[in-house]
Image (cartoon, helix red, strand yellow):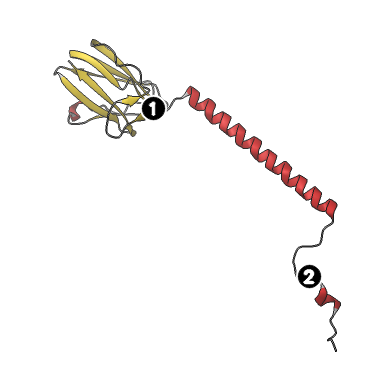
Amino acid sequence: MEPETNNSERQSTSSEPIISHSQQLARDAKKRRILKRIIILVIIVLVAVAYYYSKHPLQITSPNSTQTINEEPVNEIAQEASVSLTAAGIMPATVRVSPGGTVTWTNGDQANHSLVFTGNEDLNSDTLKPKDTYSATFDTAGEYHYHDSANPAYSGIIIVQ
């Protein structure tokens, strides 16, 4: 003889309610709409990032070199040279001047910057606020390496010859 079972015991123990086929289709359609919106949002973000970097190219520096990829060409040897400090870095990163030549840096960024020279601390600049300039004269031939204290990855070289 089989034991009697209660109807409540026969029902599923699942916590999900039983839904009709049309309800399942509606739920699936809603999931597809949400997924489409997410995909569209991702595409918009990718286009915005691509546009931004097309207007603000990355300046990449090799860890073992002070030569910068995609930098402006090294200028000819001159008595005076100009360098811009920007959110994208130091441009041009390498300049050449003759002995006695002067280099002038202009802060073209909205943030403060200051220059730190390796082994030539007397050349270090004070803090340059936006649009401030700093000039230094290089009397002795050689290479003068420096970086931006706000972002040490931004570096440059003054070649005096």
Judge left or right: residue 64 versus residue 18: left
Give SS at disc 1.
loop
The answer to whether 145 appears left or right of 26 in the picture is left
Q: Which mark's residue is nearer the viewer, 2 or 1?
A: 2
Identify the mark nearer the N-term, 2 or 1. 2
The residue tagged 2 is 12
Q: Are marks 2 and 1 in contact (CB under 8 Å)?
A: no
| Amino acid residing under circle 1 | Gln
Kindly identify the residue that appears in the image at 69 percent across and 39 percent down.
36
The amino acid pointed to by label 2 is Ser
- Name the element at disc 2: loop
Crowding at mark 2 (Cα within 10 Å: few <14, some 14-19, many 20+): few
Q: CA distance from mark 2 to mark 1?
A: 62 Å
Q: Position of residue 44 (x, y in %)?
A: 61, 32
Q: Quadrant of residue 136?
A: top left
Write the residue at 29% across / 16% down: 74
What quarter of the picture does the N terminus occupy?
Answer: bottom right
